[in-house]
Image (cartoon, rainbow, N blue to C red):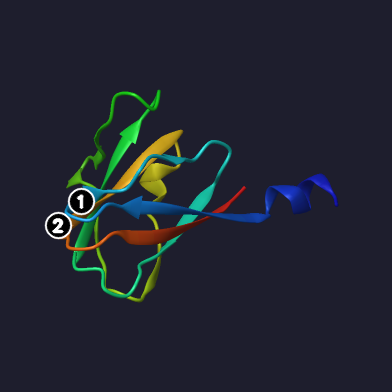
C-alpha cells in the first residue's frame, strides 16, 4: 500500500458515555485529519459539545471565536465532526443531556 493510501485509511473506535453520564471516555486523535461520529439509537441529547486536551489529563471546553463549539444531533444518525477538533490530540464528546443508559458512539477518523 502506498504512503498516500495509508494516510487516507479510515479507522474507527468506540467511545462510551456511562449510564447517568454526559461525557465519553477520552478519544485519541493523534495523526487524524478528519472525524465522524455515529450517534446510537436511544441517544437522548439533542446537542453535543466537546472537551479537548493537549496531555490527556487536563480537559477544557472547546471554543472558537464564536463561542462553544457545538452540534445539533439526533439518535441513529451519522455526522462529520467539526474541523475545530483537528489540532487536538485528545477529545471527549459531551451530550447536552444525561444519558439514562450507557451509549456507545462510533468515532470514525481518517488518517
What residue is shown at x 27% (from left), y 52% (from top)?
18
Question: 24 or 36: nearer the eye?
Answer: 24
Q: Are marks 1 and 2 in contact (CB under 8 Å)?
A: yes
Residue 16 percent location from the top left of the image? 36, 53
Is 23 placed left or right of 13 in the picture? left
- Name the residue rendered at 29%, 24% in the picture: 58
Q: CA distance from mark 1 to mark 2?
A: 5 Å
Choose between 44 and 88: the one closer to the eye: 44
Disc 1: which residue: 22
| x and y percentages locating residue 55 in the rendered image | 40, 23
51 relative to 19, above or below = above
Instruction: Please give the label number shown on residue 98.
Output: 2
Q: Residue at x 20, y 61 (%)?
A: 47
On screen, residue 38 above or below 10: below
Secondary structure under the numbered disc 2 in the rendered image: strand
Q: Residue furthest right?
A: 1
Residue 27 location (% of width, % of height): 43, 42
Q: Quadrant of residue 64?
A: top left
Q: Is residue 26 left or right of residue 1?
A: left
Q: Viewer-proximal residue, 24 or 89?
A: 24
Dot 1: what SS? Answer: strand
Amino acid at each position: 500500500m502506498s504512503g498516500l493510501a495509508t494516510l487516507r485509511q479510515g479507522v474507527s473506535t468506540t467511545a462510551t458515555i456511562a449510564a447517568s453520564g454526559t461525557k465519553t471516555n477520552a478519544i485519541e486523535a493523534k495523526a487524524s485529519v478528519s472525524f465522524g461520529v455515529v450517534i446510537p439509537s436511544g441517544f437522548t441529547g439533542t446537542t453535543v459539545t466537546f472537551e479537548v486536551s493537549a496531555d490527556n489529563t487536563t480537559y477544557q471546553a472547546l471554543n472558537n471565536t464564536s463561542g462553544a463549539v457545538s452540534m445539533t444531533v439526533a439518535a441513529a444518525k451519522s455526522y462529520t465532526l467539526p474541523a475545530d477538533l483537528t489540532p487536538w490530540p485528545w477529545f471527549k464528546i459531551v451530550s447536552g443531556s444525561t444519558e439514562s443508559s450507557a451509549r456507545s458512539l462510533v468515532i470514525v477518523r481518517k488518517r
